[in-house]
């Protein structure tokens, strides 16, 4: 009995040293189940390794979600997809697997205030995070302010490198950023004028999901981006 206790103590120490907390917590219960069900060593090892993989995936998803700054309440579960026109609903479903990120495609959502644009794309962001994608939610005004400050402080390259580490950046309220009167805001547009996106050519740039006002017609696909108009 004492040798069994010593064996378990060594095993726990090894698992701690190997940073396998889920295995450390489950190996005894899984060993009992393996004996009761006459499972092979391979099945036992698979069971405890599955626990570890599942725990790591959950921890990574939680970390990505915190990093994303996505509103926690704006998920797919809390959005009524019946609100969407059929064409938009079908288009949205094609985005959920995240392959548009691999194709370096940008997305522009536009429509009337309160039509659910931000909620819909935040829901998409949550689904992408669950699939292991790095997503950042940023109101346009705050993102522009951060970039202008970085430019002033000669840190723009560093900030752009950090932003380039994301798979997708969800930019909210693009139609409400005033054009600067100074020289630093030349890339901005006044409200009511479209901010266009282009298909990315660099593998180092994240996709941009932009949420703006009623800027364009619903069938405008110019500039290499997809457009979607929630009703």
Image (cartoon, rainbow, N blue to C red):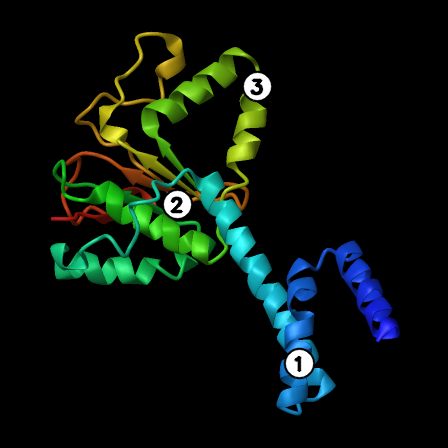
Q: Nearer the viewer, residue 134 or 108?
A: 134
Q: Which SS class for mark 3?
A: loop
**Measured along the vertical axis of the image, is residue 218 above or below residue 196?**
below
| Residue at x 64% of width, y 68% of height | 26
Distance between mark 2 and mark 1 Cα atoms: 55 Å
Q: Nearer the viewer, residue 144 or 69?
A: 69
Distance between mark 3 and mark 1 Cα atoms: 57 Å
Q: Is residue 144 visible?
A: yes
Specify the quadrant of the image occupied by residue 89.
bottom left
Q: Which SS class for mark 1?
A: helix
**Quick check: marks 2 and 1 in contact, CB under 8 Å?**
no
Mark in the foreground, 2 or 1: 1
| Residue at x 52% of width, y 57% of height | 58
**Quick check: marks 2 and 3 in contact, CB under 8 Å?**
no
Specify the quadrant of the image occupied by residue 115.
top left
Crowding at mark 2 (Cα within 10 Å: few <14, some 14-19, many 20+): some
Residue extending farthest bottom: 38
Mark in the foreground, 3 or 1: 1
| Residue at x 20% of width, y 27% of height | 193
Residue extending farthest top: 182
Distance between mark 2 and mark 3 Cα atoms: 26 Å
Left or right side of 130 for 187? left
Q: Quadrant of the N terminus?
A: bottom right
Please give the residue where the numbered disc 1 appears in the rendered image: 32
Please give the residue where the numbered disc 3 appears in the rendered image: 155
Work out whether mark 2 precedes mark 3 in sequence or the reverse, and give the earlier one: 3
Residue 199 — which label?
Answer: 2
């Amino acid at each position: 009995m004492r040798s069994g206790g010593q064996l378990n103590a060594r095993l726990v120490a090894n698992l701690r040293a190997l940073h396998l907390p889920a295995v450390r917590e489950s190996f005894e219960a899984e060993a009992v189940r393996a004996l009761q069900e006459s499972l092979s060593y391979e099945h036992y090892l698979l069971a405890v390794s599955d626990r570890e993989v599942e725990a790591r995936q959950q921890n990574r998803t939680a970390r990505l979600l915190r990093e994303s700054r996505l509103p926690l309440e704006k998920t797919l579960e809390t959005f009524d997809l019946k609100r969407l026109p059929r064409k938009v609903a079908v288009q949205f479903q094609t985005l959920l697997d995240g392959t548009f990120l691999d194709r370096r495609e940008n997305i522009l959502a536009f429509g009337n205030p309160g039509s659910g644009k931000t909620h819909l794309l935040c829901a998409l962001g949550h689904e992408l995070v669950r699939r292991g994608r790095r997503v950042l939610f940023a109101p346009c005004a705050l993102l522009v302010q951060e970039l202008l400050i970085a430019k002033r402080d000669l840190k723009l390259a560093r900030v752009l490198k950090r932003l380039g580490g994301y798979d997708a950046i969800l930019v909210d309220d693009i139609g409400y950023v005033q054009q600067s009167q100074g020289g630093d805001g030349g890339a901005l547009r006044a409200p009511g004028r479209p901010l266009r996106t282009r298909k990315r050519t660099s593998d180092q740039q994240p996709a941009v999901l932009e949420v703006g006002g009623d800027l364009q017609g619903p069938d405008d696909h110019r500039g290499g981006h997809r457009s979607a108009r929630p009703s």
